[in-house]
Amino acid sequence: MAEEGNLRRHPVQLSGTALAIMSFQTLGIIYSDIGTSPLYVLNGIWPSYGPTPPKEDVIGGLSAIIWAMTILPLIKYTLIALRFGTSEGEGGTFALLQGLYPRDTISAFQRTLTSDSDAKGRAPERIERGQSFLSRGKWLLYLWSFFGTSLTLGDGIFTPAVSVTSAVGGLAVAKPSVINQITPISIGFLLALFLVQRFGTHKITFAFAPVTFGWLVLIGATGIYNITKYPGIFRAFDPSRAILWFVRTKNYDALAGVLLALTGCEAMFANLGQFNALSIQLAFGLFVYPSLLLAYLGQGARLITDGGAVMSNIFYMTIPGPPNGALYWIVFVFALLATIIASQALITATFSLTQQLINMKALPPLRLVYTSSVVQGQVYVPAANYTLGLATVIIVGVFKNLTNLTNAYGFAVATVMFVTTSFLSIHIYIKKGLPLGFAVGFLLTFGFFDGLFWGAALRKVTHGAWVPLTIGCILCALMMFWTWAKGLEDAFDGKNRRNPRSFIVHRGFGEKGSLNRGAESDPLDIANTQQDTENNDGEIIEEDQVGLAQDTSVVKRTNSALSGDDQGDGLVDTNQELFFLDESSASAIQLPRIPTCAIFHKLTGGRGVPHSFYGYVRQMPSLPRVVIFLSVQVLPIAYVATDDAYIVSKVRSIQGFYGVTYCLGFRDDFNPSTEQILKLIYATEARLATTQARQVIGEVQLAATRTVHIIPHYRIASKDPKIELKWASIVLSWLKRFLIESLYARLSTMFPETANWALNHEDILHVGVNAAI
């Protein structure tokens, strides 16, 4: 029997070799960002133009780095956060929000076309803890999540800017004559990086992990060599050294520099869906974490022994050997490649996050381009790419001072970490069912450390952090606005569903063409929910006992049998006379059947047929031979296999009417397969085992040669809010009219919902609908 537990993706048991390979692959995708932090962290704490720090301050600063990396990336993310992925294995801030407000699961069968049906879905009712809090705080949590998500998108601007500029800065160490060309050279690399995005990343991603591996080996090995210059640097493992450093210097702002060592730790949780928790934990705990600590300790040791001689660029000046030596240029090349990989990983993550937001209707439907026919998740968003590229070039050009640039970078990182902590705390109590004390303890413990870093970053607002703050606020406002306006439009679509029995009837007409809606009328209905399915042995079993296909949350429908006296010969008269009831005059118009297939898109869930179907029948009174009502269900998983993406049901009383639910993952492209739908319809008709089955299938096949997709085209107008205070009503009416009619209506026209549909737009027919929202 299909139970809720079957809806979840079961973890795959990996062999030791497979686990090792997956752990290796995480290096290029997850750890390229945090792995390049040693390029700029120590100069972020002690700027190159400042005085050389004394020995105790260096040890204290390194102690702060070591324990910050231990408490946050190692304990918070690696050991705790990775246990909080969704039931489908996805991670990240937005996935946590989806976990709190999951979409309804697909039941085995629902009567979704007739609004007065009493059929119920069988998703078990669960009493969730904290439902009152989730209900009252929904918009606040959405706002907080969108703000964190906006700053994550901002990382796509600052990661390339900081990383590439820091790497290219090594040229000035070896060749002082090019010091004034660092910015133009960095911009050149960045322009090339963004211009090649349209070709897709699948051809170069195979080199990500080996390069990052080589980079981490290099900085770890040089760190070991540098530590031999001053072994006393290991005193930095004493956490009291960090505390004494802050007590002695009272330099709270230095935490903003320590924060740079944590950049990219959010990727460990956000990329959970691409790998698995154990592979991420092994890679970080056994390789990345010790390599980074060795690199920082080695730089600190050389800073103590060499002092001002290495202050201009602590990373490059502490490479063993002369600045023009072989090792120096090897490290430089790996540094440049590693920063490009880190930038590429963030750019790709930005594209994926943008796609997810578009599919969840939190952003306008920007054009998406799928760059790989093999890897489903590789998507290119032209508008996002050019916006990111332009913003990154401007940032590099404006921020001549690398310290101010890193200040801006750190603010985005600190805010995202704090948002994640708050959502994890809610999940601990509501979703994991642990005592409230555990949730409060987690929030106070890790929220304290996140808050320390966030406060230090906030103090840098006047020194560059205002840039990501501004970007975050603008993007967050856009997401909230689009979610609100699109929600109003979808609510209109749901409320204006029509019960087809209110305007389509079979017979029972009295004199003068008036409609007799008495006992003789045969209203539209859906087949009985007690459907049968044949298993591999030919045994008939109830459909609610059918297992789920593979590991998705979708039941594939390949049949729809009728029960009771509806079975057998003479089930449906294929030449039945259907009439359209004109509600304005109560007269009826006969509806001829035309040999075409029409797919009416239901843009939102709910019972009844879409308003566009009523408008179509009213404007051109006829019915296609095959009518398919297509609903879309976005599931809380990344991808749904094509074979498992459709649920097909058959209308009982009108031949050729079908209901189809099209299931998508939040990273899937919208591409309903007419061929796959028809295949399931043929199987449905064949398994009815009626004498008419072959004839019906033949007629459906003939009609399907001409298929059109019909969607509503809304002409949007704003409804005045109902407020008793007259002045408030006038102000709010004007504001809402401006937002809905002047902004949203125009933007929705510029970015139509069909922009990313992988359909031939010549096969799409728009039916006009006036929508007051």
Image: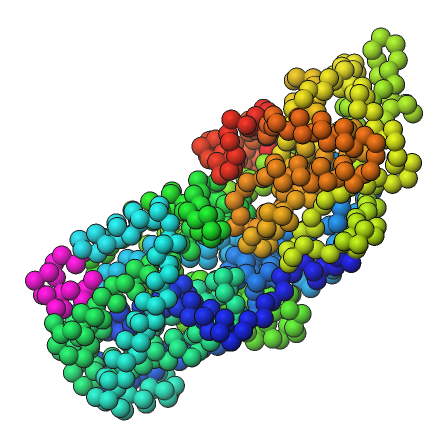
User: Where is residue 345, by image quadrant?
Assistant: bottom left
Instruction: Tell me the residue at 34%/78% (across/down).
Output: 291
Give above or below for 353 relative to 308.
Answer: above
Give above or below for 694 relative to 80.
Answer: above
Residue 672 in view (yes/no): yes
Residue 143 position within the rendered picture, expressed as x and y whole percent measured from the top left: 51, 53
User: Where is residue 486, by image quadrant?
Assistant: top right
Display coloring: rainbow
Residue that protrudes farthest toward the left in the picture: 177
Q: Is residue 482 left or right of residue 491?
A: left
Residue 617 in view (yes/no): no
Q: Nearer the viewer, residue 453 or 37?
A: 37
Q: Identify the magenta region.
A: 168-183
- The verdict on residue 317 being magenta is no
Instruction: Tell me the residue at 16%/59% (across/down).
Output: 182
User: Where is residue 118, by image quadrant?
Assistant: top right
Give above or below for 227 relative to 88.
Answer: below
Q: Is residue 522 left or right of residue 725?
A: right
Residue 258 position within the rendered picture, expressed as x and y whole percent measured from the top left: 33, 73
* Screen quadrant of the C terminus: top right
Q: Is residue 431 left or right of residue 529?
A: left
* Screen quadrant of the N terminus: bottom right
